Amino acid sequence: MTTSDANPPAWVKSARQLERERQRRRTGRRSASVAAVSTVVFLALVIGLLVSSPGWPRVRQTFFSVGQLGDAFPDVLRGFWLNVEIFLIAEPLILGLGLLVALARSLTGPVFFPIRALAVGYTDVFRGVPTILLVYLIGFGVPALNLRGVPSDPAVLGGAALVLSYGAYVAEVFRAGIDSIHPSQRAAARSLGLSHVQSLRFVVLPQAVRRVVPPLLNDFSSLQKDTALVAVLGPLEALRQAQIHSADTFNYTPFLAAALLFIALTVPLARFTDHLAARAERRRAPGGGT
Amino acid sequence: MTTSDANPPAWVKSARQLERERQRRRTGRRSASVAAVSTVVFLALVIGLLVSSPGWPRVRQTFFSVGQLGDAFPDVLRGFWLNVEIFLIAEPLILGLGLLVALARSLTGPVFFPIRALAVGYTDVFRGVPTILLVYLIGFGVPALNLRGVPSDPAVLGGAALVLSYGAYVAEVFRAGIDSIHPSQRAAARSLGLSHVQSLRFVVLPQAVRRVVPPLLNDFSSLQKDTALVAVLGPLEALRQAQIHSADTFNYTPFLAAALLFIALTVPLARFTDHLAARAERRRAPGGGT
Amino acid sequence: MTARSDGIDGATPRSPDAALLRIENVWKTYHSQPVLRGVDLDVAAHEVVCLIGASGSGKSTLLRCVNLLETVDDGAIYLDGTEITDVRADADRARKRIGMVFQSYNLFPHMSVLDNITLAPVRVHKTPRAAAVAQARELLERFGLADKAKEYPDRLSGGQQQRVAIVRALATRPSLMLLDEVTSALDPELVTEVLGIIRELKESGMTMVLATHEMGFARDIADTVCFLDNGVLLETGPAEQIFTEPREPRTREFLQRVLESGRI
Amino acid sequence: MTARSDGIDGATPRSPDAALLRIENVWKTYHSQPVLRGVDLDVAAHEVVCLIGASGSGKSTLLRCVNLLETVDDGAIYLDGTEITDVRADADRARKRIGMVFQSYNLFPHMSVLDNITLAPVRVHKTPRAAAVAQARELLERFGLADKAKEYPDRLSGGQQQRVAIVRALATRPSLMLLDEVTSALDPELVTEVLGIIRELKESGMTMVLATHEMGFARDIADTVCFLDNGVLLETGPAEQIFTEPREPRTREFLQRVLESGRI
Amino acid sequence: PADSTGDAKASTSATGTAACAKDKLKLTKPGRLTVATDKPAFEPWFKNDDPSNGQGFESAVAYAVANRLGFAKNEVTWTTESFDSSYAPGPKKFDFDINQISITPERRKAVTFSDGYYDVAQAVVAADGGKYAGVTSVNELKNARIAVQVGTTALQAVRKQIQPATQPQVFNNQIDTINALKNKQVDVVVLDLPTAFYVTAAQVKNSKIVGQLPRSADGTEQFGLLLQRGNPLAGCLNVAIGQLKSSGELARIQDQWLTSSAGAAVLK
Ligand SMILES: Nc1ncnc2c1ncn2[C@@H]1O[C@H](COP(=O)(O)OP(=O)(O)OP(=O)(O)O)[C@@H](O)[C@H]1O
Ligand SMILES: Nc1ncnc2c1ncn2[C@@H]1O[C@H](COP(=O)(O)OP(=O)(O)OP(=O)(O)O)[C@@H](O)[C@H]1O
Ligand SMILES: [Mg+2]
Ligand SMILES: [Mg+2]
């Protein structure tokens, strides 16, 4: 600004504004109470209906038994570390693979047709094939091939199947993000002399990734739960431990223990991405550029 | 344009341009062949390695037996209709629920806090809970409640569990789309006199939905495959049929039949959305607004 | 309340000779940084007001406040005697009567030019589609865009986009138009045309508030010119007076620099 | 080949007195609709060329072709004697030496103003970050934006955004600057300032091609003015000649209308 | 011939407990006995994945029990019930489920079991000529990679009696368990003895039963019929099973469909 701040009038809130704010607070409080009360009533109704139903004691006993939860928890937790481990190793690989495939798909020009076709074929097939089949195919098929030097640890093979399957999903998410960046952004980057790769890296991808964080998180939490699929290859992860306890006792509560653990992982992640989104939002306040 | 088209020079392609196009075609052809050849070689290598491995005959027999495929196919196909049915009924419900929750989450102002909290709680919990537990809880728990007027068909209950689970995922996808629309678009809509709901309906959502088509399609194809989870409640859908055949014959090929059916559903969907995306892209050619 | 609001209750309709738009002591802050500082302004029906001032002085913000896209932090805005900043007022009803054109066009990229224009008439004003289309085509014709009706905004040049934005706002037949630097992206030939159209609109009784950097344009079209300086409405007066004998030294200084830039 | 390309091979460096930028018979079509029709233009080093013409006449498209953001459909463009439209030429190397400012700013919304400006110096020209930041701050200071270095683009007013875009292009120290209606969103005070900066740039030896609707500005800054009409470069000449005694009737007509709009 | 004896015994029992008269029973479908099992149904418990053919041990037991209760073969309906859903709370769509389900005290809290109709022993299967083919004691299995199927009591038997150094691997179903053995992803498989005989004879070439696990301290493991919790039908089923046992008919069925366990030595 070049204007000098000579004699700026001081702001003393007018009586009107004070009255307005009072009124806003009042109606705000009123609507907030209405909303809160109706929400609470709604929840109470649902819960009441549930609890008062004739079968509730049996259902509570079968799905929400505190004793069973306590009994199963240590085993389920032990299994859960395997899920976390597979997740932590698979996720970076998935992100890398997904990004590569997304970039391959967004290559233009007839020259890249075969690579594009490969990428398209990959996403099509691997999103279509049930993950469980992939786990079987890799978990039982690869050891059966009798190849030397190929790992045979079921957790590793199961993890590889997950990477292949989720790579296809994540690739599509990234592609959506990349496509949603207006071409003028890339034009601006290229005009500054940035190469194709640099434009992607510094201009397109940072914006694209931010836009797709919620769907990515979707795939994260799906993956977290699908780490349970490696159980078909034998390892004792959380859901399998729950299943064993459930079969032993004919009670489904152990699954609840697994669910609580999975939720305990998803919620902080969700809050973290909300925080990121809110920060990005603050940067583009509506006042300026419009 | 107000300019008259007086005396427009006619365009005869110059010798330079013709030479340039020849050269472009030539290098284009060359690079295209290089790319094609390397892709083919890569694929051939992978396949060759596979086929020449000592265990290949056994793997082929176990996973890719033509005879088994033929035997299992009719049953798997019969089961597949159930998957398609559940999918077709669940998907619209999921889209509706997801949209509602996404809109609830994007409400601003302290008044809406309880609704927002409810929506946040829903997405957090239902993305965290393993879908299989939800299927158990609803498929076994709801009939056990002995409530009158509540359906007890396992396909319906399983479908309801899928709706609740995927509703949370789709809500997050929609939210990403809504958040990615610049606030100035909403400002423009409001300034024309459109109400909040109208702005959403005519301006924000159409753009948001287009942006999230690929991640939505991800959730579609996940859902397609997770319709298999209702099998734990008893109905004989495709994967279950495959499993039965597989157990009969100690051969995994029947799963391949299921996979082929799922792929047959996913690929046309994927091509269709690609087509939509390409059309949207053509509308925002880089030339104009930049 | 400011001294100006002498006994007038916002909810009661006022005498017809009163201002169509009355801005009273409007304050607006962003992150406790004041951007508008107690702006007072009356715009009579059929009047054309130009807001001039340096970049960042708050012109766009003032227009956004009038259109209720921002909540004012103090003060009041009346449209036709009704306080539209009232807590209980229906913002959509007020906006229906106000047309706005944005500095950055804000066209809807997923709709053709024609759909952009007919959206509000059809959805908000319930005009039959055929009538809305006919009117839109007529307006497009007048702005030299007849052949672009089926195009999508991203394919148009900057000037073409801004013209579509103007047409879109006009199509709702507002009784007050807010125009934020509408001519900045137009080529000079079209400025003449738009000027003609705005004059035409004015003659047809349209009330307008324009933010502009085009002094020649302002001098030509405005009944009243307001000079905004760092959020303060420093000087208001007839166009001729402001441009020839400004009272405030800041205004003189500003116009001096503008003169040097060759835009007056 | 046009008659002009007499024996000059694009790949051979030419004598130093030749044009820094040479545009030869450039054609560009969109969907078989010609937008540029055989444009020929020479820009000498240290020369400032203004493109004028109606909206949609192809000014932006020509600038985009020079910066290789569009592939020409015929003809050639030489920078410093090297054909940059050659099939084998490295587009990035050419662009490194050309700065461009867009009509719609195209700032990177995820980066602060400072990061927008230092991106290319640091990543493309390998300037040490500290030096790049110092230079950026200096430029921001000169453009009255010193306090906005840490802001994000969406929070700036339109004029502020455009100034940042100019600074960003300048920061790569290009030998040719392409400016697409850079002053359209600036307030008159800043136009003077930018004008000053452009004159300064010119004196420091910068070659510039500007598309503009500001005739006063064009007359003041340009060595050569080109009138584009519907994709045809209808008339080229010294600014004074074009504005006072244009040869073509279309040019005269255009300027007549501009005169009426009060922008000259 | 079995029919005549069956009828005679049934009539005596009916006089003993009048509540078990065919028309007094509260059934899922009146007048019919609804029996559930999983699909696919494996040999030697069923044959050709068709429970209604009366072939295979459990199919034959089900028909024998039905017969004792006075149901003719065509009055028995078979329905599919997966193991996971057999113990879901709420009303059941079968009268009893016969699916190699072991009776345990914990499970009794959720469902009602009939008396046991088969004494189960767990057997260890290994690759013929492999490292564990000649094992004679449980101790030698401590370092083996062991596979079991989920939901079976084999897992507890392994944990209690072998106490292996590494966690046993738990597979979804029999086919995955067997494939893991074939692929050499595990060294031995633990499963119930009848299945083990079938696996080694028909399913995995070059495999053999190494031996049976010794009976655990807390009593013999038995398969029972599974009923809705509190279903009074259990009493009548117990009467019928008691009669089958005392008449020697159950032993005859067992001899007909299951290989004698004498062929597998008990591990020390
Ligand atoms: N949402 C926002 N958050 C923070 N600051 C804002 C926001 N919107 C506007 N501002 C600041 O408010 C001031 C006034 O902005 P405004 O857009 O009203 O100026 P203007 O007079 O229209 O300028 P121009 O002529 O450049 O368009 C500027 O300094 C701007 O940076
Ligand atoms: N990608 C595109 N697809 C189709 N038409 C295009 C495209 N880009 C530009 N055009 C058309 O080409 C013509 C020239 O556009 P250009 O942007 O070069 O005009 P301009 O002279 O810069 O106009 P203005 O002064 O309004 O910026 C216009 O009619 C425009 O609609
Ligand atoms: Mg502004
Ligand atoms: Mg342009």
Image: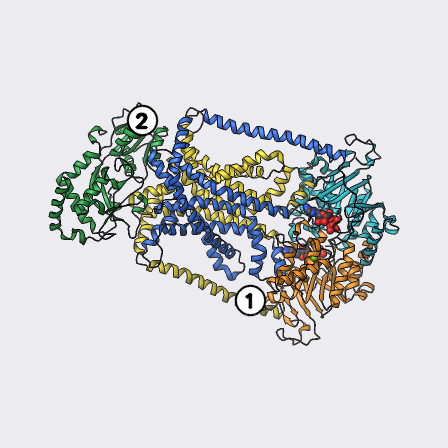
Chain colours: A yellow, B blue, C orange, D cyan, E green
Residue farthest toward the top in the current orientation of the protein: E129
The answer to whether residue D239 is above or below residue A6 is above
Residue indicated by mark 2: E205
Question: Quick one: label 2, few (<14), some, or many (20+) residues within 10 Å?
Answer: few
Q: Which mark is residue D97?
A: none
**Pointer 2 chain:** E
Residue C124 x/y as whole percent: 60, 64
Q: Which mark is residue A24?
A: 1
Point 19% across, 44% down: residue: E65
Q: Quadrant of residue A105?
A: top right
Q: Is mark 2 within 8 Å of ligand 2?
A: no
Of all chains, the one bearing label 1 is: A
- Name the one closer to the observer, A120 or A34: A120
In percent of width and height, residue A116 lies at 57, 36
Q: Amino acid at mark 1?
A: Arg
The answer to which of C124 and B179 lies nearer the viewer is: C124
Q: Which quadrant would residue C111 be assigned to in this image?
A: bottom right
Q: Mark 1 touching mark 2, by CB under 8 A?
A: no
Judged by depth in the image, the label closer to the viewer, 1 or 2, is: 2
* Local SS, label 1: helix
Residue A51 % position (x, y): 34, 58
Would residue D44 be found to the left or right of residue E146 on screen?
A: right
Is residue A263 in view from this perspective? Answer: no
Label 1 Cα crowd, 10 Å radius (few <14 / some 14-19 / many 20+): some
Q: Is residue A216 visible?
A: yes
Q: Are marks 1 and 2 on the same chain?
A: no
Marks 1 and 2, how far apart at CA: 81 Å
Secondary structure category for the residue under label 2 = loop
